[in-house]
Amino acid sequence: MTIRHYLQFTDLSADEYAYLFRRAAQIKAKFKRYEKHQTLADRTLAMIFEKASTRTRVSFEAGMYQLGGTVVNLTAQGSQLGRSEPIEDTARVISRMVDLVMIRTFEQERIERFAEFSRVPVINGLTNEYHPCQIVADIFTYIEHRGAIQGKTVAWVGDGNNMANTWLQAAKLLGFTVHVSTPSGYDIDSTIPGVELGDHVKFFKTPHEACAGADLVTTDVWTSMGWEAEDAARQEAFADWCVDSEMMACARPDALFMHCLPAHRGEEVSADVIDGSQSVVWDEAENRMHGQKALMEFLMLGQLDD
Ligand code: CP
Ligand code: NVA
């Protein structure tokens, strides 16, 4: 059987996403009713964290237990990865013992090397370049609140980072537009393999212009994990890229606000926006778990519509 990895958003087709969002809704409804849904009984997920996490760790771990499976949790420091064991050897060994692997790491190339030597599906839990599981949750959350995302406009305000790259991939695949505004020098890097420009993306000088007419306004930290040495310079460069109520007022009156979290109130978003009525950040965080349960099930068992 061919192994399906989930290393980038483009690893699933638009039809498969339609299934995934339907399935996530079914799985979420059962969770809310305390109904058992144990399609991965006796399966084991290994998680490797080379960067910090709260949501990714809890959503995958709780989700796998709810699916009837178990979880093994590794960090770089607490494993031989931190003592230079090659990622290829780690992949060969771990994938003989578990059914599924989730990795949060630095370069995308590192997860690709792991996947090449893995006997089991590998899921990207965030790399420097991409964060596909987060965009699954974000789009699922949009659909829950507003219906189909096709034809809509998402405003990306802030860093041209892993989240921005993944929004671009999703827009091209699922048929919506991303309005991007980044401070100069922090633009989206279209030389990254898989980051494509085209009709699905438009660039704006000011964040207010990017937000004009948007159905969804979204942002992220100014300094992502791995870029901490640039923090002081970034604080200065991003000062005008704080999503506040004035910026939200440029968007459609029914626009939603999303942030993958963790958030820094007073930096990339004002407290009144993230804690205000247009914000759906807590649903977005919860939906990490429901989306990933659907994803893990899909990678292991294929489509299982009731
Ligand atoms: N959004 C997200 O991935 O959160 P964590 O870094 O806490 O996992
Ligand atoms: N862009 C952020 C996302 C954190 C979930 C980072 O990579 O640190």
Image (spheres, rainbow, N blue to C red):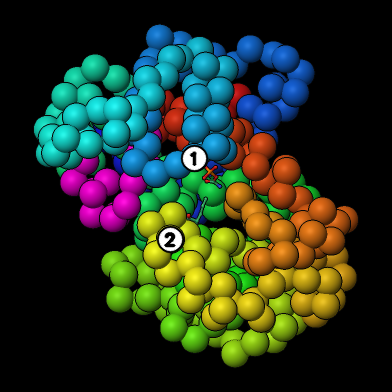
Q: Nearer the viewer, residue 133 or 224?
A: 224
Whether residue 283 is visible, yes or no, is yes
- 236 or 87, which lies in front? 236
User: Can residue 154 be seen here?
Assistant: no
Q: Residue at x 42, y 19 (%)?
A: 71
Identify the magenta region. Answer: 100-114
Question: Dot 1: few (<14), some (14–19), or many (≥20) neighbours within 10 Å?
Answer: few
Q: Position of residue 165 (x, y in %)?
A: 45, 66
Q: Nearer the viewer, residue 279 or 230?
A: 230
Residue 228's disc number:
2
In the drawing, what numbered circle is on residue 289?
A: none
Q: Secondary structure at mark 2?
A: helix
Residue shown at 52% from the left, 16% from the top: 65
CB of mark 1 near ligand 1 (< 8 Å): yes
> Quadrant of the image for the N terminus?
top left
Q: Which residue is mark 1?
A: 53
- Relative vertical location of residue 110 with respect to residue 162 in this rendering, above or below: above
- The residue at 71%/49% (across/down) is 281
Placement of 28 over or under 204, stated as above or below: above
Against 118, residue 51 (above or below) is below
Residue that lies at the very extreme toward the front in this rendered image = 232
